[in-house]
Each structure stands twice: as C-alpha cells, then as structure tokens.
Amino acid sequence: MDALLLRSLQSYVIDTFGLESWKRICNATDAKVETFEPMLRYDPGTADRIAQVAADVLGRSVDAVWEDVGTYLVTNPEREGVRRLLRFGGTCYADFLHSLEELPGRARLAMPHLDLPEVTLDETGPDRFELRCQSHLAGLQRVLVGLLTAMADDYGALCLIAPGTDARTSITVLDSRHARGRRFDLALPEG
Amino acid sequence: MHAGRPDHRIDLDSVALAHFMPMHLLMDGEGRALSYGPTLARVLGGDAMPGARFEELFDVRAPGGAVTVGDVLARAGNRFRLVPRNRVKAGLRGLGRRLPGGRILLNLSFGIDLISAVRDLALTDADFAATDLAMELLYLAEANAAVTRELRGLNLRLEGARVAAEEEAMTDPLTGLRNRRAVDLVLERLCAARAGFGLLHLDLDYFKAVNDTLGHAAGDFVLETVGRILREQLRSEDCAARIGGDEFVVIVAGRSDPKTLQAIADRIIARISQPMPFDGQIARVSASIGIARSSDMMVPDPTQLLAIADRALYAAKHAGRGRAVLLVSRGE
C-alpha cells in the first residue's frame, strides 16, 4: 500500500510542480531513490515520511498534499484508469459510496498481494454517511477525502465531506444531481 | 427446506420477469417469441419481433446439430450456446426450460464476449440485473490491464537498471575502459569460439615516479590519458581494459599477424611516451607490452594466454622498457 501511495505522490508532484521539485524532495530524504515502483514493496511508514518531506519542501500541510493526491488520482486525464475503476462502483454517488466496501475485495482480484485496508460505510441518516478506513498509513484518510470529493464532482453530486477523528470521514450528500456528471462508458473504445 | 416443494409457484408478470432476467426470451410451445427481456431486445435489434421463430433469431453453436429450440432443449439438457443471426458479435450462453402449460423460457447471458457486446451495444449497468457479475468482469478486465501495464513498465525499468549495473560492473571508473572481469569474460568467449586474436599486456614505465614526484592527481591524469589513447587506437570490436594500478590489457580481435600486432603495440607505446602536460608540469611515462596470440595455441586457454603475455611483458621490461615483445609459445 505504501508503494501505491508513494507512486501516486511522485506522479502528483512531478505533474503539478515539475521534476525538479520531486528531486528536491528526494534529496531531502534518506530514500536514495527518485522513482517509487507501484509494484514493489516499501517499508510501512515510508509513504507518510516522504509525504511529510514533500509538504515541507512545497510549503504546504501534509494533509493538503495527500488530499491533492486523492483529487489528482481521479481527475488527471493521464490516469483515467483509477476514475474508471471507481465508477464501476455504481450509477449514482450513493451507490459508489456503498461500493467502497467491496473495493478491497475487487482490488484483491486483480492484485492478490495488495493489502487494501478494510472499508466500512454506515448510513447515519438520510443522505448522510460515515466512512471508516483504518490503516497504518496516516495519509490515507486525506487521500480518501480528496478522492471522494473528486468523485462527487464526477457524478455531479454536491457533497460536504469532512474528515473526523478515528479514521472516520463524514459525507453529506446535499444534492445528488447538482450538476451533470462526467460521462462514463462501461467499455473503453477499442484500441 | 421448502425450496423443492412444487406448490410454491409464483406468478411473474413481464415487468417483473424483465427486472430479474433482462435477457430472457419467452416463447410459445412451437418456439415463437412471446416476449423479450429489454437487454436481449437490444442485442437482437430489429429481429426482436413478436412471433419471430427461435431459429430465425439464433444460430445454435452447441449442442451441435440443434436448430430449433425443441432440438436445443432435447439435446442439451438445459444448457446451450447461441450466436444471434444479426451482425452483433456476442456469444450467448443460456439455459432454458419448458414451463407448465407448454411455454418455453430461455435466460441468456453474455459469455466471454461481454466486453465487446457492452462496447458495441453501448450497454450500461441498467441493462444488467443487479445480481449479474458483468460489472465485476468489466472491472476485473480493466484492473488487470492496468496491473499488466504497470508490470510491463516495471520490467522495462528494471531491465534498464540491470543493463546499466552490468555496464558499471564491467567498467573501470577512472579510465572508462573495461575491467578485469570484462577481460575474463571476453577471453573466455573468444577462446571458446576458437577465434584468432592478439593479447597485449601493457604495463606503464616510470609511473611510480610520476606518482611520487607530481602526486596522485598527476598519476590519475596519466591513467586517464592512457585510457583515451587506447580507445583512440582501437576499433570497436577490440577490448581495452585496466586490470590493475598501471596495468592494462588489450584484446585485438581477428588479428594474428605478428607484424600487425607489433605495429599496433609500437603505435600505442609511441603515443604513451609523448609528454603529458599536467597542471603546469610535464608527466613522462612510457609503456612495455607483452604480446601473445591465440593462434599459437592448439586449444586457446585464457589463463595460459595471459601467462604467455605476462612473460612477454617481463621480457620487454628486461630488454630495456619502452618496447613490445611478442612471445611465441612452444608446446603450450
């Protein structure tokens, strides 16, 4: 899991701030590498450590950095794959939220060694949800917040998303058809 | 425990049937269509007419030889494979059964052609029953493609790193020439191939004096200069290596003629013997070279060839340095 977040962080920094910024971040760490491989394994905690350095170098809070990474994963046109995989979750935002509980299982189908943390979603009231995702990765909650926010836009839903304590994030859907969502075709065009 | 009891009959209207089975086909006892599930209707397009006959709609792929729905149910038990007769590229799997009262109910699903069918017919998840695993299959296909893409990228990057590491492991960092490891590999390969080649073992003369009087930086400069000279004097198929402090090996591929090898060695010595200006001072060295030829041995052997070249080098040093000696081995 650290590997995926590290690679995401790397892509986000390079695409947003440029390669030089990423090199500065790597030089400021003891990582000794400038490329993180999503398919390799890194020591637990590496992602949080590098993100803290990135936050220092970029002059932002580490929470803001992770949230931006989450948004970047869904909105970056080069990474259409993540958004597509998430959109398979359902036809509306609420369906999508419920599908997050199945996400670790789905991910295991494609990558048996990927240890996605378990996700639970509670409906706490009409259009009110609470997402819980416990992980050794401190940054994961903020990545999820960024990702949930971007997916709300993708579905055209107007939401209030607030990270809380104990790895809980509350989501209030104010208007599920606030805007026209982005188009989603189940199958990619051939080729 | 009531599941098998025949008295639990349910009546489904066509709306409910379409909800549970969006790809069903209900037919009368003669195989004429009564109703189509909405997704199957999209697959069949204009063919999905009331009263259409089963065999006009579908080509039966399995069981072999079956044409009518009666054949299919009789021959296949309740499992079969069809393709629509229109141009839609979608293999359909199905199961079917004669209902009490004589009507026939078929329920179909996309087999492995799911993805192309979804693409060609622009299906959405509203076209599938919520229990259908179609979404999972589509999801898995894309997730798999993404993982494979990442792995391919990883492989390429690792291969690049491996080539760079191998190159580094074969290179002398100071001169950029090959190192001892590379020489051993090249010699082994050439000897195994019984290739004709010349082996030059080169040792600098007066190098210690340069180091002692002008310092190690000057010594390094001399070694770098010798590296450049060797690279300039050799062809790409040759191999020049630094195998020790001021010791070099040159493998001249495809050359066994004594005069040629001697000329190459003399040219190298002449170049190295020229004064090398360094930091306002002049470093002066020369070189002695021992030459051995693979063609002098019945069975070329790297260790013995190196030993012969080493003895030739010793002879060159002994004869007054700044010269090359070719030693022809006898009986080795």
Image (tube, rainbow, N blue to C red):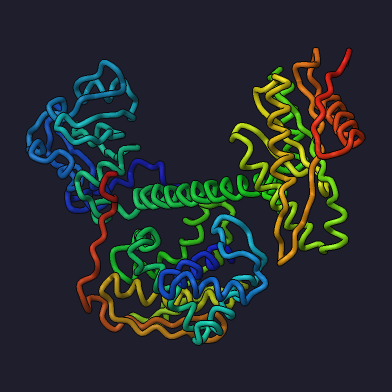
Q: Who is closer to the viewer here, A49 or B87? A: A49
Whether residue B227 sits left or right of residue B99 in the image: it is right
**Residue at coordinates 83% horizontally, 19% vertically from top-left?**
B328
Whether residue A24 sits left or right of residue B192 in the image: it is left
Q: Position of residue A152 (x, y in %)?
A: 32, 74
Q: Who is closer to the viewer here, B122 or B302? A: B302
Q: How many numbered marks have been drawn onto this rendered protein structure?
A: 0
| Residue B163 seen in this snapshot | yes
**Residue at coordinates 50% horizontally, 75% vertically from top-left?**
A21
Q: Position of residue A93 (x, y in %)?
A: 32, 71
Residue extending farthest right: B318
Q: Is residue A60 above or below residue A26?
A: below
Q: Position of residue A175 (x, y in %)?
A: 26, 81
> Would you identify the image quadrant in which residue B26 lies?
top left
**Residue at coordinates 27% horizontally, 34% vertically from top-left?**
B92
Quarter of the image that includes the C terminus of chain A: top left
> Would you identify the image quadrant in which residue A53 lies?
bottom right
Q: Position of residue A72 (x, y in %)?
A: 40, 71
| Residue B170 seen in this snapshot | no
Quarter of the image that includes the N terminus of chain A: bottom right
Q: Is residue B34 above or below residue A108?
A: above
**Residue at coordinates 70% horizontally, 53% vertically from top-left?**
B224
Q: Who is closer to the viewer here, A157 or A124? A: A157
Q: Who is closer to the viewer here, B42 or B77? A: B42
> Would you identify the image quadrant in which residue B203 lies?
top right
Q: Is residue B176 above or below residue B191?
A: below
